[in-house]
Image (tube, rainbow, N blue to C red):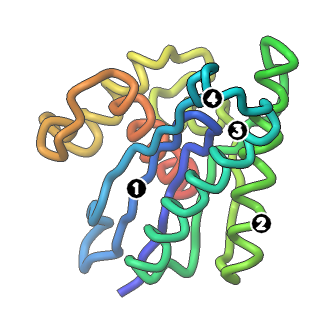
Amino acid sequence: MSRVAAFDIGFASTGAAVLERGAQDWKIVHLDAFFTFKCDRKQKLYVAHDDARRVGEMARKIINLISEHDIKRMVVEMPSAGGQSADAVRAMALASGMIATIAEGLSVAVEYYTGHETRIAAAGKSSATKPQVVKAIEARWGFGLYDEWGFSNNDQREAVADALATFDAARA
């Protein structure tokens, strides 16, 4: 069976979906949302050291998912530009470098998509809001999708919806 991993890659949060080609259409095999958090300031850790820890933590989760599901191809919504601050731009660069390094290191084929492409694929317009994307993905993949997989908060739902929207962009 052919399996594809779709990621909404981020530094603080990443949405992940594993899909498998069935006889008629694709089916969801696994959904996940990964989060990393800054260390408590009381630990007196340099920001760069904490960033390295967080990249390692996120990378391990992604590598484990790729290995567990024998992924040979992944589609990724890559941050493209325009961060709201220097910290946001740094986080986008760290996430982009991390996923590119994982793909290269594991010899996994990868295709990159922009947020505009994924929003168009999911909701039909590049200006779609996060709630509109979440709703459109639930309509596409089945109502109750998030509850079925145990995603109870908005951050989880948005991360997973964006990963599935990335898969839809790859199919377009």
Which one is closest to the eye, mark 4 or mark 3? 4
Marks 4/3: CA distance? 10 Å
Q: Mark 4 vs mark 2: which is more N-terminal?
A: 4
Query: Where does the image place residue 147, in percent across and percent down from the top left?
Result: 14, 36
For the residue marked with disc 4, what is the amino acid? Answer: Gln
Q: Residue at x 82, y 40 (%)?
A: 93
Q: Which residue is mark 3?
A: 50
Q: Which residue is mark 2?
A: 101
Callout 4: few (<14), some (14-19), or many (20+) C-alpha neighbours within 10 Å?
few
Which one is closest to the eye, mark 1 or mark 2? 2
Marks 1/2: CA distance? 19 Å
Marks 3/1: CA distance? 27 Å
Callout 1: few (<14), some (14-19), or many (20+) C-alpha neighbours within 10 Å?
many
Residue furthest to the bottom = 1
Which one is closest to the eye, mark 4 or mark 2? 4
Marks 4/1: CA distance? 34 Å
Going by the image, does 108 lie left or right of 140? right
For the residue marked with disc 3, what is the amino acid? Answer: Asp
For the residue marked with disc 2, what is the amino acid? Answer: Thr
Callout 2: few (<14), some (14-19), or many (20+) C-alpha neighbours within 10 Å?
few
Q: Mark 4 vs mark 1: which is more N-terminal?
A: 1
Image quarter where the N terminus lies is: bottom left
Residue nearer the viewer, 59 or 75: 59
Whether the residues at callouts 4 and 3 have beta carbons within 8 Å, the answer is no
